[in-house]
Amino acid sequence: LNISDYISSGIIESYVLGLADAAEQQELEQLRIQYPELEAAIRAFEQSLEQNALAAATPPPAHLKEKILSALVQEAGESRAIPLPVYNIPPASVKPMSWFRYAAAASLVGLLASAILNFYLLNQNKALTETQVKLTASVEKNQQQLADMQNYLAMVTDTAMYKVVMKGLQSKDEMATIYWDTRTKDVYLDVKNMAKPADDQQYQLWAIVDGKPVDAGVFELKENKMQLSKMKNIQRAEMFAVTLEKKGGSPTPKGTMTVAGKV
Amino acid sequence: LGTKTTYTEAELVTLLKQRDNHSYTYLYDHYSGALYTVILQIVPDRDIASDVLQDVFVNAWRRIDQYDNSKGRLFTWLLNIARNAAIDMVRSKGYQKNQQIRELPNDVNGIDTGNSLKLNIDNIGLRKVLNNLKEDQRVLVDMAYFKGYTQDEIAKELNLPLGTVKTRIRTALIQLRTYLQ
């Protein structure tokens, strides 16, 4: 699949406007995960569509705002009202009782009902607190992932970022990419696929300057593929390479070179 | 008190999912105009369009948990809810009956009261962009986007091969991106 042909095929517009069929939607949703340039193009089209629509806004009648917002308040009320269970107790056939017996029976029933209700409310409260803790954690996690993704996208689509692809020397599957900021000379590393090192070992990045390796920092493999590692600032280099060194790094490269790429 | 006047999209979505009142007011202030235009382009009657707009916000409230940022921007999601709600309205039996009654006096007097409004609406937003397209493409995108026909239905309606319909819509959509920028 040629991704740039795909991007300019009209499928993005069709998807965003809700005209794509189920198979097309599914295909696009898979491909956007694999191709950052497709993801960026979708976001860009959505943005221009939104700007165009905001510029063409027609103010709705003034009274409508209050009407709609109060409709939402009503929605809120309906969804909050949790129906309490209703117990149908069949009337028992009883002999006439004295007022004392009635009162005792009534207070027992009242006590029992209150105990049941308390138990029910306590459990409900516990369940709600648990749900809330879980939700908060999941929201925070999602927000972090989203922020990482947005940073990643901003980085890979920034035209001032110079890209150096480092290919695997030991295994073809291994790959990492350097994003080198042409303004600040900051170096960011995007590991696409690299084997997990042994516990006493760590990967180290080198910039090759005038034929000599210059340390650009050690790094850990990230769990989230969209998280980049910020490496040392490198003013100039003709090549970048990664070697496997002892934990904490080495002043000069001694270990095996895993990936490398020319600038 | 204590309400922010701008939110990032992520902040806004988090608050909307908590059913925070202020965030819905913000949503309304920010997007109701843009959505109202799109609805009017499908349902020209202002009163009915207002009802549709209300449905859109109630639906957004009910379905906000299903919104998934990885599949698109918040506005894209709202826009699709609005478009679907407007098309559903036009297709409803009540609306169709009403239209027949409305059209009669207009024909007799030769005056279309909604006309001045309609003209305005037809030359802004996505409609305006569509007006740049060639006639044979414009008709197809109009049927697909504003009338909600499937490509199969368009092919049958216009007596064109399905392949032709697909190609023309795709070609039109490719140009859309350029015109929007």
Image (tube, grey):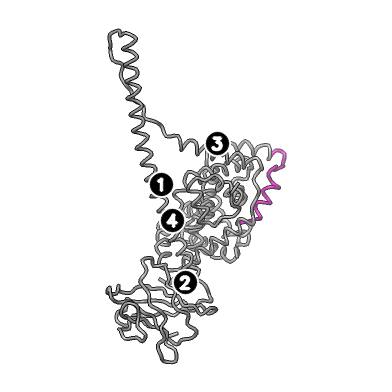
State whether discs 3 and 4 lie on one chain: no
Residue B167 marker: none
Cα separation, mark 1 vs mark 2, equals 44 Å
Q: Which residue is mark 2?
A: A4
Task: Compare residues A65 and A256 and report the one nearer the observer.
Answer: A256
Tell me which numbered mark, 1 or 2, is placed earlier along the sequence: 2
Secondary structure of the residue carrying numbered label 1: helix
Residue B94 marker: 3
- Determine whether label 3 and label 4 are within 8 Å by CB: no
Q: Is residue B35 visible?
A: no
Q: Which residue is mark 4?
A: A140
Read off the chain for label 1.
A
Residue at x 62% of width, y 42% of height: A65
Position in image of residue A89 (x %, y %): 31, 21
Secondary structure of the residue carrying numbered label 2: helix
Disc 1 residue type (three-letter)? Gln
Position in image of residue A72 (x %, y %): 54, 40
Disc 4 residue type (three-letter)? Glu
Closest to the camera, between mark 1 and mark 3, is 1
Q: For mark 1, does the 10 Å Cα neighbourhood hold few (<14), some (14 to 19), or many (20 or more) residues?
A: few
Closest to the camera, between mark 2 and mark 3, is 2
- Determine whether label 2 and label 3 are within 8 Å by CB: no
Position in image of residue A29 (x %, y %): 42, 61
Q: Which residue is mark 1?
A: A132
Residue B142 vertical position relative to residue A220 in the rendered view, above or below: above
- Determine whether label 1 and label 4 are within 8 Å by CB: no
Give the number of callouts. Answer: 4
Task: Compare residues A216 and B97 and report the one nearer the observer.
Answer: A216
Position in image of residue B137 (x %, y %): 56, 60
Cα separation, mark 1 vs mark 3, equals 43 Å
Q: Which portion, as a residue range, is magenta?
A: B107-126
